[in-house]
Amino acid sequence: MTASLHTTTGHPHPALAALRGYLDEVTRALGIGLESCTVDHDTPVSAYIALDERLPGYPGRDVALLWDEAHGWSAAIETHSGEDLIVIRYLGGPTVTPAAAAVARFVTALREDDHRVGRLDPPGLRAAGDLAELEALLRTGRAR
């Protein structure tokens, strides 16, 4: 089930409040608000953050940050045909819940076309599905 973070879905999800808090930190670090976010409650739990910018090499394409509980953060561009997003880079690192400042540095590197930050292949940081573990990571597992 996909929903805005401001929409009450009635869908019981133990990690949703913790994910909302984490996304609030990340969006504040990016200088945008939670209204740019949607969350998919299905496994793997994931989030989408719309960015109001274009990246070098992708003129005319909307950009989004994606997060999921198995791979962490990635950057993607929208297609013109309405197909799935095209992931162009993964943040990587030791956790799916890096500090908001690390996510902001990732976006800055994307803007500057700095390929030293991130990676091209999806990192396998954790197995999806353990919602209690995910909630704990979202509440306490962020690198500072």
Image (cartoon, rainbow, N blue to C red):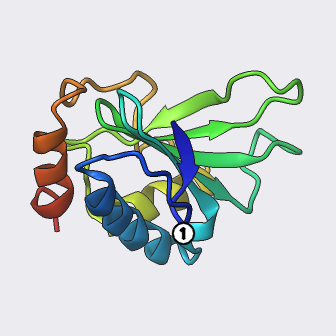
Q: Quadrant of residue 127?
A: top left
Q: Where does the image place residue 13, in percent across and percent down from the top left?
A: 30, 46
Vertical comparison of 68 with 26: above or below: above
Vertical comparison of 129 with 96: above or below: above
Q: Amino acid at mark 1?
A: Leu
Q: Nearer the viewer, residue 39 or 77?
A: 39
**Residue that badge 1 annotates:** 34
Q: Quadrant of residue 26?
A: bottom left
Q: Nearer the viewer, residue 23 or 106?
A: 23
Secondary structure, mark 1, is: helix
Q: Is residue 50 left or right of residue 67?
A: right
Q: Where does the image place residue 128, in percent across and percent down from the top left?
A: 25, 26
Q: Residue furthest front?
A: 10
Point 57% across, 74% down: residue: 33
Q: Where does the image place residue 6, in percent across and percent down from the top left?
A: 54, 66
Point 54% across, 69% down: residue: 34
Point 27% across, 63% down: residue: 99
Q: Where does the image place residue 77, in percent across and percent down from the top left?
A: 70, 37
Residue 51 showing in the rendered view: yes
Residue 112 showing in the rendered view: no
Q: Quadrant of the C terminus?
A: bottom left
Q: Is residue 37 left or right of residue 83?
A: left
Point 30% across, 26% down: residue: 123
Q: How many circles with numbers are drawn on the protein?
A: 1
Q: Nearer the viewer, residue 80 or 36?
A: 36
Q: Residues within 10 Å of mark 1 (few under 14, many from 20)?
A: some
